[in-house]
Image: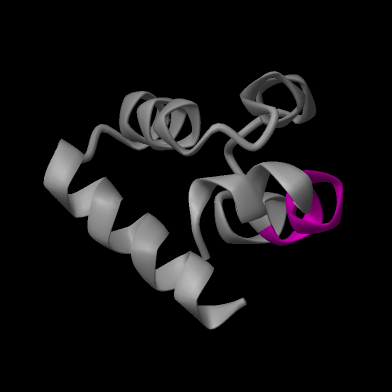
Amino acid sequence: MNNDQIEGKWKQIKGAVQAKWGDLTHDEIDQIEGNRERLEGVIQERYGKSKEEVRKEVDSFFESL
């Protein structure tokens, strides 16, 4: 799923994002607005993971949708 698809379907995807990364607040998810870089940054900050680790995790998540 490319960035345009993510942004276009963000309202549908938000619930799956919340289920996958439960520590993210609803406000954070709303502020991400489908922007993949923002999503990766918030996950990295919240979970203390490396940029590469988060990128792989997000890739896997979007491929599974």
Name the residue at the front extreme: 4
Residue at the image position 40 percent from the left and 31 percent from the top: 37
Count every numbered label the image shows and give the total.
0
Name the residue at the right extreme: 11
Residue 59: image x %, image y %? 36, 63
Region of the chain picked out in magenta, as a range? 10-16
Residue 45: image x %, image y %? 34, 24
Q: Is residue 12 magenta?
A: yes
How would you classify the magenta stretch by its main secondary structure?
helix
Name the residue nearer the viewer: 23 or 59: 59
- The quarter in which the C terminus is drawn is bottom right
Residue at the image position 85 percent from the left and 46 percent from the top: 11
Name the residue nearer the viewer: 46 or 13: 13
Residue at the image position 18 percent from the left and 38 percent from the top: 51
Chosen colour scheme: one colour
Residue 2: image x %, image y %? 49, 57
Q: Is residue 45 above or below residue 1?
A: above
Residue at the image position 71 percent from the left and 61 percent from the top: 16
Q: Quadrant of residue 27?
A: top right
Name the residue nearer the viewer: 40 or 21: 40
- The reply, left or right, for residue 23 in relation to residue 27 is left
